[in-house]
Amino acid sequence: MEGNKQIYSCPHPNCHKTYTKHYGYKVHYETIHLGQTYKCSHPGCNLIYSRKYDMLRHMKSHKDTKQFSCQECGKKFGRKEHLQKHASKLYKCQPKRSYKFSLMYIMD
């Protein structure tokens, strides 16, 4: 242990990767040394993921439903975290422009 953290070392010969989290080690070992990957099954999509969770999250992108919308500009997103990023201070959205206006006539 280094400090109070447990270190997970890859047992594969000639691989010197170490991880502070078991999950990171597990993903590394299964992907790199066992060749375990998750491929998107959508026709024409060739994306491959090392984690099943990421592949399932990606699969939702093939659906047309965008259920999260910005209250300021109305832009829609398929994932909550994309809406949050859009609404964050770093990515300030521009309020939807309203083209409503009134005409003022001056009568003589």
Image (cartoon, helix red, strand yellow):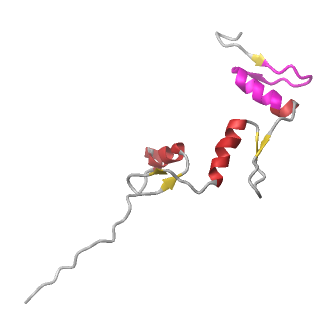
Left or right relative to 96: residue 11: right
**Considering depth in this image, is 17 or 30 the residue closer to the camera?**
30
Residue visible at 77% across and 25% down?
26
In the image, is residue 46 part of the stretch drawn in magenta? no
Q: Which residues are magenta?
A: 9-30
Residue visible at 23% across and 75% down?
102
Where's residue 41, x and y in %?
76, 49
Looking at this rendering, what residue extends furthest in the right direction? 13
Left or right relative to 18: residue 67: left
Looking at this rendering, what residue extends furthest in the bottom direction? 108
In the image, is residue 24 part of the stretch drawn in magenta? yes
Compared to 101, does 7 lie above or below?
Answer: above
**Considering depth in this image, is 23 or 43 the residue closer to the camera?**
43
Compared to 101, does 46 lie above or below?
Answer: above
Residue visible at 62% across and 54% down?
63
The quadrant of the image that shows the N terminus is top right
Where's residue 101, x and y in %?
26, 73
**Considering depth in this image, is 71 or 97 the residue closer to the camera?**
71
